[in-house]
Amino acid sequence: MEYLGGIVDYGVIGLLVLMSVAALAIAIERYLTYGKIRVERFPDKKTLEFELTKRLHLISTIGSNAPYIGLLGTVLGIMFTFYTMGREGLMDTGKIMIGLALALRATAAGLMVAIPSIVFYNLLLRKVRGIVLRWETGHGR
Amino acid sequence: MNAQRLGITASLSIHACLLSLMLLILDDKPVVIKTFHINFEQQEPSFPATRKAVNPRDSRPNAPVPSTRRQNVLPASLQQQETKAPVMNSDPEIPIPESAGVKGLVKPEVQLPVGVGIPGPEKQGEPSVIDTQFGNMGAPAFLYREMPVYPRAARRMEKEGKVMLKLLIGMDGTLNGVEVIKSAEYGFTEAAVDAVKKSTFTPAHINGRKVASRAILSVRFTLK
């Protein structure tokens, strides 16, 4: 069970950092693409929608899963803390508290990844909707 | 492609900035918590509630030393000393005759001053680890025992009392902590704790290795 501590620290938080980087990268790229897109080049609506929503689902997945991954890290950290405390037979509350606090930072990291991701996702969705409507008005629908 | 690469690099740089900021701000040294690492190899026996004079398992035909294995209930007045180690400079021990093998040691209360009837702290709670060789298995013991001072108020009011302390004794014999399990009024608890703090100890041994331990000490104040 000793490796649980390492898993929480490097595994979970590292994964969250990766996800955050990916989400932000996709969001920036999509935003730039939406700025440059020319709606008249698309003959029909479905192709336009397909092109617009290309990587949005990734942002959505990251945004909705990051809290769970953070929670998983917290649960593992708490398990590890209690296991260690139980095995040593110590009831030193200070050490327990610090272990728990450090375990909770995984949840905090998960939330910090999720909140901007959801914001970006909603903003991008709104932009997609705007572009599709622009196409619709341009094509007289 | 251009937008993608731009996005990735922008994201990476932003995250690098944020992470370094966070590390700078939140970086405090890990708090060093002083914990007492106590081996749980010593079990706590139940407290002597009744006077049970017979503990038949104590008899060991070849052992010239008092064997106090498996004692659950220790008679309150019998001084059970579980090590052969020279315990207290002032307490002579009477070893158990082999045939009888049932009584613990009886310490004559020679050193106690008149009027202060403390029958000596009884060292219960020291290793009732089972089935270890007697010579090896050591209990923490007093190296120098400071006798508690009978509180004046209690003596005036002719009160007696009993205090039970749990001593956390480290590997080098230092007293790491004192916990009061059962306290008494009229200053008995403070007197007992003060005396214990002024005493020095030898640590417990398991197989010759010094271990930290928790020992229960019962100090009874009686008036003679």
Image: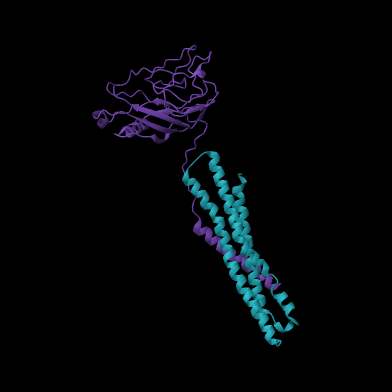
Chain colours: A cyan, B purple
Q: Residue furthest right?
A: A43
Vertical position of residue A128 compared to residue B155: above or below = below
Q: If the image is split into quadrants, where does the N terminus of chain A sit? A: top right
Which quadrant would residue A70 be assigned to in this image?
A: bottom right
Q: Does the image show residue B156?
A: yes
User: Total label count?
Assistant: 0
**Residue A80 screen position, x and y as percent:** 57, 46
Horizontal relation, residue B221 to residue B137: left or right: left
Q: Nearer the viewer, residue B139 or A139?
A: A139
Which quadrant would residue B191 be assigned to in this image?
A: top left
Q: Residue furthest bottom?
A: A140
Vertical position of residue B131 compared to residue B169: above or below = above
Horizontal relation, residue A99 to residue A40: left or right: left
Q: Residue at x 62, y 64 (%)?
A: A64
Vertical position of residue B190 compared to residue B143: above or below = below
Q: Does the image show residue B30?
A: no
Vertical position of residue B141 compared to residue A28: above or below = above
**Residue B72 screen position, x and y as percent:** 48, 26
Q: Residue at x 44, y 24 (%)?
A: B74
**Residue A43 screen position, x and y as percent:** 76, 82
Q: Nearer the viewer, residue A38 or A42?
A: A42
